[in-house]
Image (cartoon, helix red, strand yellow):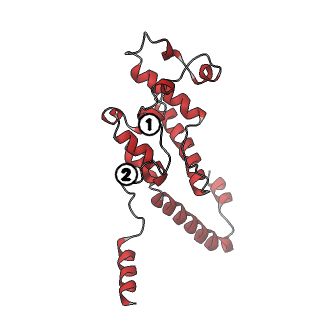
Amino acid sequence: MRRFFKKLLPPPKWRLPVLVLFGIFSGLAAYILYISNALSYLSDDPKTCVNCHIMTPQYVTWQHSAHREKATCNDCHVPHDTIFNKYFFKAKDGMRHATIFTLRAEPQVIKMHDPGKEVVQGNCKRCHGGLNENVSAINGTLETSKHGEGRLCWDCHREVPHGRVNSRSAVPNARVPLPQSPVPDWLKKHVEKQAESK
């Protein structure tokens, strides 16, 4: 075992530069985790969804819906069959969102992609199945809907819970929790002092 770890070590003259590079990359990774508020994504708090300002219409429409009393964003938008699948889906979807926002390729109107539709349809059935066991549409899936052989729940319940209008400009005066600034207080004070001295 020791031999294996010795083989992983760089030659003695490269150890200091490798250590410095390791420190830089570790620091950058820690900073990215901090600035992206990454730990908040492990929770079920709906405020996490407005870490990105683009989700404001979705947060506001949920907040004014009946679902606010019983369901968080994750209750509808992530699978609940196993805890592994829940966090795997959150990680996969989160990486997709982070990539889109980093590349500034976000659309004006956010629409669910197919994996998201499957999950939401499954969660509609999970929560409302007991009430709707005699409704024939309760057996609808994304596949049957695509082939015109069934409907998704929100094909009829279009206003639940986000409404039909949810573009970025749909709720211009909405009050949502603002993400905390990643700029430390000491740096803000320093910048204010610099501005006052000019």
Question: Which is nearer the N-term, disc 1 or disc 2?
Answer: 1
Query: Residue 43, position in %: x, y?
Result: 40, 44
Q: How crowded is the residue under tag 2: few (<14 C-alpha within 10 Å), some, or many (20+)?
A: few
Q: CA distance from mark 1 to mark 2?
A: 15 Å
Q: Is residue 43 visible?
A: no
Image quadrant assignment for residue 197: bottom left
Give the residue at x 56% y 51%. 98
Query: Residue 135, position in %: x, y?
Result: 45, 12
Q: How crowded is the residue under tag 1: few (<14 C-alpha within 10 Å), some, or many (20+)?
A: some
- Under mark 2, the amino acid is Ala
Per the image, the residue denoted by label 1 is 163
Residue 121 vertical position relative to residue 60 in the rendered view, above or below: above
Residue 179 vertical position relative to residue 124 in the rendered view, above or below: below
Q: Which residue is more in the foreground, 128 or 93? A: 128
Per the image, the residue denoted by label 2 is 174
Q: Which residue is more in the foreground, 22 or 37? A: 37
Q: Total of numbered circles in the picture? A: 2
Query: Residue 166, position in %: x, y?
Result: 48, 43
Give the residue at x 42% y 53%. 172
Give the residue at x 58% y 71%. 20
Mark 2 element type? loop
Left or right of 32, for residue 45:
left
Image quadrant assignment for residue 161: top left
Q: Is residue 152 visible?
A: yes
Query: Residue 145, position in %: x, y?
Result: 60, 22
Left or right of 171, for residue 14:
right
Residue 92 vertical position relative to residue 75 in the rendered view, above or below: below
Give the residue at x 67% y 65%. 10
**Which residue of the protein is positioned furthest toward the left in this rendering?**
69
Mark 1 element type? loop
- Under mark 1, the amino acid is Gly
In which quadrant is the C terminus drawn? Answer: bottom left
